[in-house]
Image (cartoon, rainbow, N blue to C red):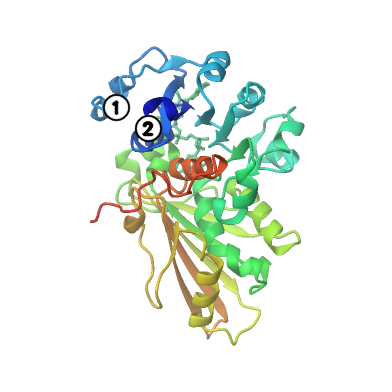
Amino acid sequence: MGDSDRVPVGIVGASGYGGVQLVRLLQDHPKLDLAYMGGDSSAGKPFSDLYPHLANRTDLMIEAIDLNVIGDRCQAVFLSLPNGLACDMAPSLLEKGCKVLDLSADYRFSNLETYEAWYGKRRTDQAIAETAVYGLPELYRDRIATAQLVGCPGCHCTASLLALSPLLKQGLIIPESAVIDSKTGTSGGGRKAAVNMLLAEADQSVGAYNVARHRHTPEIEQICSDLAGHEVLVQFTPHLIPMVRGILSTVYATLRDPGLVRDDLLTIYQAFYRSSPWVKILPSGIYPQTKWATGTNLCYIGIEVDPRTDRVIVMSAIDNLMKGQASQAIQCLNIMMGWDETLGLPQLGFYP
Ligand SMILES: NC(=O)C1=CN([C@@H]2O[C@H](COP(=O)(O)OP(=O)(O)OC[C@H]3O[C@@H](n4cnc5c(N)ncnc54)[C@H](OP(=O)(O)O)[C@@H]3O)[C@@H](O)[C@H]2O)C=CC1
Ligand SMILES: CC(=O)N[C@@H](CCC(=O)OP(=O)(O)O)C(=O)O
């Protein structure tokens, strides 16, 4: 395929951590062409000033955000911005015929009252928001295929939901018993300066944050409720750990049938994800590590049952910037374009 046959795409928020993943991934994608980069404080700078290691692959400038320019130049656009900005841009971009993939929380909620309550921004785009599809391909592949607007999931949500989904969908657990303990690296906080992300603060230390009030809780609950067929509340506690990339979500839940053993669940998970090339169910007794997923779009899942407590324990590892953010967005765009969902995405990480 020649360059002119490639689909031109844009990134708004190219200077951030999500943006730089997208730039790298697009260099290796056989059918997508990076045609526009937009930003705020970075506008007017060459991208290579911010990321000199990519100077040999792109000489594009970051431009001031102009929705008309994006509409003229791009067939699809990734919005990789802080929460509350995409909802002011997406309606115009959709009107101009762009496919929109939002990496923030703006289009993840089917009920905007939930969004307003947790994100504190009044929304006036209910009709547009209703057309958005939640960008977790393993659950909503068919709907993503026909979507114009995709609300890509948060990183903790991706790892947690991939761990929980088979249990809820098959009615194997008491839904309200689900407890999610999730650990993230510091890149989850983005490239902006923040005291708690300083090496001196985050290194050699582990702590929970936003306990009982993290905004990923209602997002996880929305999808769990959809899977269970009734309203479900979960307990979600994130922890910041001293590493750069990665999420490990450990999910605990009470089994409805205490007779189920680990191998039964492994069979159920393998069947559930048999058409999902990015989810790898690990063999009996093997538990995932974040390093295995680093730099890839993969999610590794390990499963255990504790017959003493009748609980199942599911461990799910992803790269927060990849399956948790940028590469998952490209996986969604592949599906929206009718291409193989693995197209152009890295399957092998660096190890160690
Ligand atoms: N980091 C992660 O692990 C994950 C993040 N997300 C979500 O993805 C989105 C992007 O995150 P991330 O890449 O980490 O964030 P960063 O903080 O690294 O980057 C934010 C980007 O937004 C731009 N920006 C900031 N303010 C404005 C503004 N007022 N107008 C226009 N552009 C603005 C910045 O541009 P400039 O530099 O030009 O000012 C920058 O490019 C967020 O919504 C985040 O919650 C989702 C999943 C995982
Ligand atoms: C370390 C850290 O702060 N991580 C972020 C995760 C960011 C993320 O997944 O994305 P969204 O903000 O788009 O939901 C957090 O817990 O809020």
- Whole-percent x, y for residue 280 in the image: 43, 64
- Disc 1 on helix, strand or loop? loop
Label 1 neighbourhood size at 10 Å, few (<14), some (14-19), many (20+)? few
Quarter containing the C terminus: bottom left
- The answer to whether residue 214 shows anywhere in this view is no
Residue drawn 33% across and 58% down? 292
Observer-nearest residue: 196 or 333? Answer: 333
- Whole-percent x, y for residue 4 in the image: 41, 25
Please tell me which of labels 2 and 1 falls first in the chain.
2
Kind of residue indicated by mark 1: Tyr
Quarter containing the N terminus: top left
Give the image quarter of residue 168: bottom right
Give the image quarter of residue 149: top right
Residue drawn 50% across and 79% down? 305
Q: Are marks 2 and 1 in contact (CB under 8 Å)?
A: yes
Residue drawn 38% across and 37% down? 30
Measure how far apart labels 2 and 1 are at the Cα level: 8 Å
- Whole-percent x, y for residue 130 in the image: 73, 38
Observer-nearest residue: 310 or 73? Answer: 73
- The answer to whether residue 288 shows anywhere in this view is yes
Observer-nearest residue: 30 or 80? Answer: 30
Instruction: Say which mark, if any, is on residue 51.
Output: 1
Kind of residue indicated by mark 2: Val
Residue at disc 2, CB closer than 8 Å to ligand 1: yes
Horizontal arrangement in the rendering, residue 251 relative to residue 204 (left or right): right
